[in-house]
Image: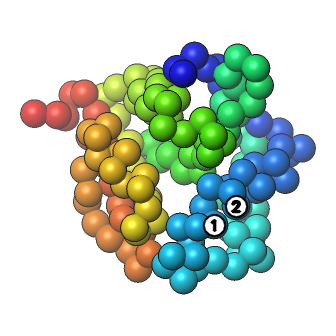
Amino acid sequence: MTSFAFTPATEADFERLLDLSVRVMREHLERVGRWDPERRRARMRAAFDPALYRLIQVPGGWAGCVAVVEHPDHREIHSFYLEPGLQGRGLGRAVLDAILAEQPDRPVRIEVLKESPAARFYERAGFRLTGEAPFDLLYEHRGAARRG
């Protein structure tokens, strides 16, 4: 499954996206001792700017979301969540490839929770580990012009 479209998020999407983030992240946060429903809500609320979020639509309905933030020297991806039943079918890679293709010469950064299977996903897509934080791994995709 790789056919999708982006549509803009609105404030009214917050609860649905929070619910998706819980269903996607809870198991992984529990594994590293960081699961707390109030903390999850607060972190999602702090990061939620509808102007940055894109809903991912597939034939038949809604599939997830992703946020893309423009910085002076790079782009940042966060809150990339797909419905669990749609994971592992190529949709995530298609979405990621589309984002990378929008500005192929700019680096893209992402933080990935330690011990998350998402790390392998980003590594397969050409992201390289650039550092660590207490609970996250820091990755960067250097862009087409910077790959050697």
Looking at the picture, the colour scheme in use is rainbow
Tell me the crowding category of disc 2: few under 14, some 14 to 19, or many 20 or more residues within 10 angstroms, Cα based: some
Give the amino acid at mark 1: Arg
Q: Determine whether 125 is above or below 130 in the image.
A: above
Tell me the crowding category of disc 1: few under 14, some 14 to 19, or many 20 or more residues within 10 angstroms, Cα based: some
108 or 62: nearer the viewer: 62
Report whether residue 10 is seen. Answer: yes
Report whether residue 73 is seen. Answer: no
Residue receiving disc 1? 26
Residue 22 at what x, y percent from top left?
70, 61
Residue 66 at what x, y percent from top left?
60, 41
Give the amino acid at mark 2: Val
Residue under the image location 70 percent in, 69 percent down: 40
Q: Determine whether 12 is above or below 135 in the image.
A: above
In the image as oriented, which residue stretches furthest toward the left?
148
In the image as oriented, which residue stretches furthest toward the bottom?
33
Q: CA distance from mark 2 to mark 1?
A: 5 Å
Q: Which mark is residue 113?
A: none
56 or 30: nearer the viewer: 30
Residue under the image location 41 percent in, 79 percent down: 134
Q: Quadrant of the C terminus?
A: top left
Q: Quadrant of the N terminus?
A: top right
* Dot 2 and dot 1 residues touching (CB under 8 Å): yes
Residue 137 at what x, y percent from top left?
36, 65
Q: Which mark is residue 22?
A: 2
Q: Determine whether 42 is above or below 93 in the image.
A: below
Task: From the viewer's perspective, tell me whether residue 80 is left or right of residue 104.
Answer: right
Residue 143 at what x, y percent from top left?
28, 33
Residue under the image location 72 percent in, 39 percent down: 51
